[in-house]
Amino acid sequence: MFIKVIALHFLLNDVVFDLDPSRMMHPLDAQRFEALSIDYIAQLGKEMFAENPQAHRYNPERARRLCYLLHLKMPRVNAAQFLDHGGRGQAAEVLADFKALNEMALSMMYQQQVTGQLDATKVDGAVWHRHAA
């Protein structure tokens, strides 16, 4: 009997991360994790993106960990967007949006990313429905 392990992907802004738990740098302590609320985890994301709007690109391990925490707290969610509307580096001005995307579509986006065919414009239009003015 074979058990097929399905890859777990998570879209953060315009980057699709592979969330294989075995690749996480620090294992989660169950008691400490239980104490974290979704609001606290979202605040961590807001602070991360207030520091650097491209944090998901410049610190992929930290971004992957944020995705993993979000997914563990909200198992149906597999996409998050953190967008600094103020542009002044204030966490209070970073908006957070969460979505549950079709897993097959997310997997296809991951494959496009691997081959260099996925860009921010495609993701914004297809997922976040933002279009350049």
Image (cartoon, grey):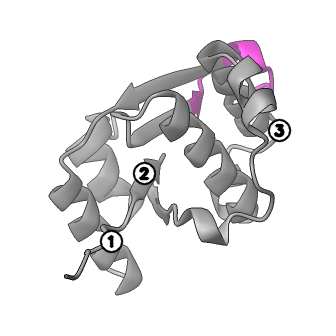
Q: Residues within 10 Å of mark 1 (few under 14, many from 20)?
A: few
Magenta residues (range): 83-93
Which label sits on residue 11? 2
**Lower position in the chain sequence, tag 3 or tag 1:** 1
Label 2 – label 1 distance at C-alpha = 19 Å
User: Tag 2: residue type?
Assistant: Leu
Residue 54 in view (yes/no): no
CB-based contact (under 8 Å), mark 3 and mark 1:
no
The residue indicated by pointer 3 is 51
Judge whether 16 appears above or below 71 on screen: below
In the image, 60 versus 131, the foreground residue is 60
Query: Can you identify the residue that label 1 sits on?
Result: 5
Q: Residues within 10 Å of mark 3 (few under 14, many from 20)?
A: some
* Residue 79, above or below 98: below
Amino acid type at mark 1: Val
Query: Left or right: 7 with respect to 95?
Result: left
Position of residue 13 measured from the top left corner of the image (x, y, whole percent)? 48, 46
